[in-house]
């Protein structure tokens, strides 16, 4: 049940971002690769083809708590039982788009620049653990990472931005 709910949240965020990206001036077209196993392993939801010829790989995060807490969860360990790396480590996306579910804004995080800042300052961020549920509502494992204020990312990560949807 919780897995299904989380998938529905993710799908909602992706739909919002696809529509938003399609309206961007430089966007020529968008390829939704979120259901493609090849791109799932790389943590990429969309390939955004720009009119300049550049292709931007995007991962969408739909966040229902960011308006309340001001925090972004930086996932360093995806599954604590298997010790698998988190999406912040393995993602091949160029951009993470954090959708603010309540206030309808998007936090644009360039992943390369964010990694440089987060790794350099990792010890100052609060550790956090997030349960992951199975279909029957039982906790299967936890994701682990750090909580970072989105305002800190805006101030310290080059090219980070916050825009209305």
Image (cartoon, helix red, strand yellow):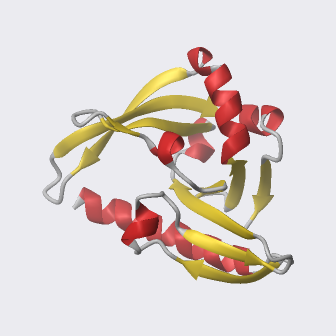
Residue 150, can we see it?
no
Res. 73 in view: yes
Residue at 69% from the left image edge and 43% from the top image edge: 112
Q: Which of 141 and 165 is in front in this view?
A: 141
Left or right, 144 with respect to 33, comes to left
Q: In which quarter of the image is the N terminus?
A: bottom left
- Residue 105 % position (x, y): 70, 59
Task: Residue at 77%, 62% (x, y): give it.
Answer: 164
Q: Which of the 4 image quarters holds residue 99? A: bottom right
For image coordinates 70% across by 48% down, the residue present is: 109
Which of the 4 image quarters holds residue 106? bottom right
- Indicate the position of residue 97 as horizontal and vertical percent values: 64, 57
How far from the left and from the top, in percent, is residue 161?
A: 80, 50
Q: In this view, does 17 lie above or below 96?
A: below
User: The C terminus is located in which quarter?
Assistant: bottom right
* Left or right for 117, reference 14: right
Is 108 displayed left or right of 62 in the figure? Answer: right
Picture quadrant where residue 129 is located: top left
Q: Nearer the viewer, residue 23 or 37?
A: 37
* 60 in relation to 153, above or below: below
Indicate the position of residue 30 as horizontal and vertical percent values: 65, 81
Name the one closer to the observer, 39 or 97. 39
Give whichever of 94, 151 is nearer the camera.
Answer: 94
């Amino acid at each position: 049940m919780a897995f299904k709910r989380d998938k529905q949240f993710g799908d909602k965020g992706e739909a919002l971002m696809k529509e938003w990206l399609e309206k961007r001036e430089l966007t020529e077209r968008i390829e939704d690769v979120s259901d493609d196993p090849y791109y799932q392993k790389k943590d990429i939801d969309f390939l955004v083809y720009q009119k300049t010829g550049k292709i931007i790989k995007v991962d969408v995060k739909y966040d229902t708590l960011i308006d309340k807490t001001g925090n972004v969860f930086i996932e360093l360990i995806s599954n604590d039982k298997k010790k698998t790396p988190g999406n912040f480590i393995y993602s091949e996306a160029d951009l993470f788009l954090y959708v603010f579910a309540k206030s309808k804004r998007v936090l644009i995080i360039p992943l390369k620049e964010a990694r440089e800042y987060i790794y350099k300052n990792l010890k100052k961020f609060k550790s956090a653990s997030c349960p992951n549920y199975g279909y029957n509502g039982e906790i299967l494992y936890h994701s682990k990472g750090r909580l970072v204020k989105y305002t800190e990312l805006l101030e310290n990560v080059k090219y980070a931005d916050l825009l209305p949807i």
